[in-house]
Image (cartoon, coloured by chain):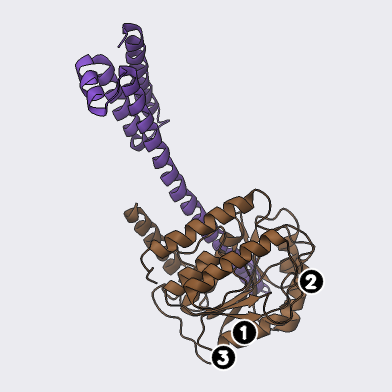
Amino acid sequence: MNQLKRKQTEWIEEQSVSLEFFSEEPITPLHQKVPLGDSHKTLIVIPSFNEEASIGQVLNDVKENVPGTPILVVNDGSVDRTAQIAEECGARVISLPYNSGYGVALQTGYLYARKHNYSIVVQMDADGQHDPACIQDLLNAVKNSAVDVIIGSRFLGQNTYRTSIARRIGMFVFGKLASLFCQERVSDPTSGFQAVKGKAIDFVASDHYPPDYPDADFLIMLNRCGFTIREIPVKMHPSKINKSMHGGPQSIYYVFKMFLSIFVTLLRKKPRI
Amino acid sequence: MPPRIRIIAILICIFLVAYVFELVRRRHLSEEYSMGWLVAGSLMLMLSISEGLLVWISNLVGATLFTSTLFFFGLIFLVTICLHFSIRISSLTNQVRTLTQHMGILHSEKQSLEEQIEQNSLGQNPSKLEKL
């Protein structure tokens, strides 16, 4: 099985090398650290699935707040006009052939970022929940510190974000677990509003990334690999359309998966990147 | 073991082994996946035919009924093969995910290249440029 995996990785690396002429800059292999010079190459990654109602507004707000920064929309098999609207707004669009889930779409953005040598990736949601005005805060925090991952937390500072009691309990428990194992306060482990830099981008693009629900388990994994994380307060609006990833019967799976994933993450050897 | 259940067990095992061979012959089942079925089918066949072996194994595992021995090993085989399939499905899911992601990225890059070529070819003779 390991041999098969190694062969796959080799094949993918070979393809990346043969496609080098596609990218403007040479591709950095996974094991090399991306240098962070004065000029940071930043990419904003927005995974989206059927977000035609909000994507246009989100993209315009992002362009207004961080002008000139390339935006990548990963269209996760939407059946509406999400991809067209994103293209019309000037974003680069990667369309996945079918709906693969939030984590897979997000990781696709990181794979693209790694391939094209981006040194900072800001990830945010397409449903208008994350305030684009806070992107600059995330960028400043990640640029002006040695921290690898900055998480925008909706529960720090003066925030009015309201959610259901069940979700709050879940976030509290997993936040406490993440805080315990990361030795860093984590109040919002499910936040999809993050800025990631340098080698941490390679880590997200690697096989170690949990592709279904990248939450507390992933933060613990990051910490075990020596990456540093920090939270900063951000403004979040309640999602206009209620389509949480953790609702209904899936929430039972989510809780089970998260406990199991945290447990096995602690049992595993530290991944080498 | 009563002769009736013995004959039924032998017939089922022969049918299973023969059917697996036929599936492999028709290329409906790959050799890799046929091995487990053939080994399990053959072992069950041996246990059904040889009463001495069945008695010996039943004593070994502590089964009071000989049919329980057959069910016991049948169940072990089914659990093993289900676990094996779960591992294969996990591996295939990961492979499909990687393919999907790389396909999406390559498609986007291809489109971008086509657009660049189209822009560059404006003013040139388009017939000289081959469409990607």
Q: Which residue is mark 1?
A: A139
Q: The residue under label 3 is which amino acid type?
A: Asn
Q: Which residue is mark 3?
A: A144
Near mark 2 (Cα within 10 A), the count class, few <14, some 14-19 or many ≥20, is some
Residue B8 picture quarter: top left
Distance between the alpha carbons at the discs numbered 3 and 2:
29 Å
In which quadrant will I find the C terminus of chain A? bottom left
Near mark 3 (Cα within 10 A), the count class, few <14, some 14-19 or many ≥20, is few
Q: The residue under label 1 is which amino acid type?
A: Leu
Q: Residue at x 31, y 28 (%)?
A: B40
Depicted A185 relative to depicted A10: above or below: below
Near mark 1 (Cα within 10 A), the count class, few <14, some 14-19 or many ≥20, is many
Depicted B129 relative to depicted A184: above or below: above
Q: The residue under label 2 is which amino acid type?
A: Gln
* Sequence-first tag of 3 and 2: 2
Residue A61 picture quarter: bottom right
Q: Which residue is mark 2?
A: A57
The x, y position of residue A92, in whole percent, is 65, 70
Secondary structure found at label 1: helix
Chain A visual colour:
brown
- Residue at mark 3: chain: A
Q: Residue at x 42, y 69 (%)?
A: A17
